[in-house]
Amino acid sequence: MSNVLLQKVEFQTEENALGTWQRYLSAGGRYYAEFKSHRRMFGMPLLHYTHGRNPRTGRRTIAVGVVAVGRIAVGVFPVGQVAIGLCPVGQLSLGLIFGIGQLATGVAAIGQLALGVLFGAGQFATGYIAIGQFALGFYALGQVAVGAHVFSMKVKDAAARHFFHFLFGGG
């Protein structure tokens, strides 16, 4: 059996006004696609999309752009199974400002495991304000909660009650 990585790979390349598509379909049915926009911001493409394994390298291409979409995505607004950036969305979402994902980090985080600095909401949540089934924060609201001001199944701190009442529009 020959090593297909040693063979020349010819992509179907299509350029339009928005950017460039590169596509490849192997004899075995594996599909690879990549799109990079012509417009750039912060030195990155405005949009970078990847799908599948690059037939030249046999590896996944990391999508890097202002908006990055791929299995692994890095950028300002990345979306992917692993998303790293300012405001990512992904299964593993490592955000600086805001993160949404199964495991999310950021100043504010929403996810099954939400590790927020100021705000966290999820099944397991941390942050100055933490809301979750298990919450750890200065103001903590949850079935099981730990913090300075707790509103939980067992503890009903007056300051926490007032804070969360105000937070949820109670005035």
Image (cartoon, rainbow, N blue to C red):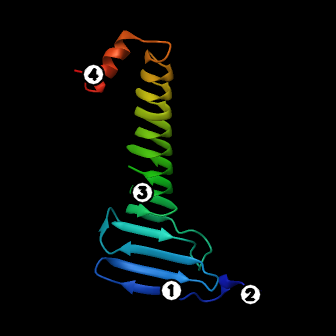
Which is nearer the N-term, disc 2 or disc 1?
2
Q: Residue at x 28, y 81 (%)?
A: 17
Up-down: is 163 above or below 103?
A: above
Label 1 amino acid?
A: Phe
Q: Nearer the viewer, mark 4 or mark 3?
A: 4
- Badge 1 local density, few (<14 within 10 Å), some, or many (20+)? some
Image coordinates for residue 143, horizontal then vertical, percent: 50, 23
Image coordinates for residue 93, horizontal then vertical, percent: 48, 48
CA separation in Å, label 4 and label 3: 33 Å
The residue pinned by badge 1 equals 11
State the count of labels: 4
Secondary structure state at the residue bearing disc 4: helix
Which image quadrant is residue 59 in?
Answer: bottom right
Image coordinates for residue 164, horizontal then vertical, percent: 34, 22
The residue pinned by badge 3 equals 78
Question: Is residue 96 visible to the viewer in this orientation of the structure?
Answer: no
The residue pinned by badge 2 equals 2
Question: Is residue 133 visible to the viewer in this orientation of the structure?
Answer: yes
Which is nearer the N-term, disc 1 or disc 4?
1
The extreme top residue here reads: 158
Disc marking residue 166? 4
CA separation in Å, label 4 and label 2: 68 Å
Which is nearer the N-term, disc 3 or disc 1?
1
From the viewer's side, name the closer residue of 124 and 35.
Answer: 124
- Badge 4 local density, few (<14 within 10 Å), some, or many (20+)? few
| CB atoms of marks 2 and 1 within 8 Å | no
Label 3 amino acid?
A: Pro
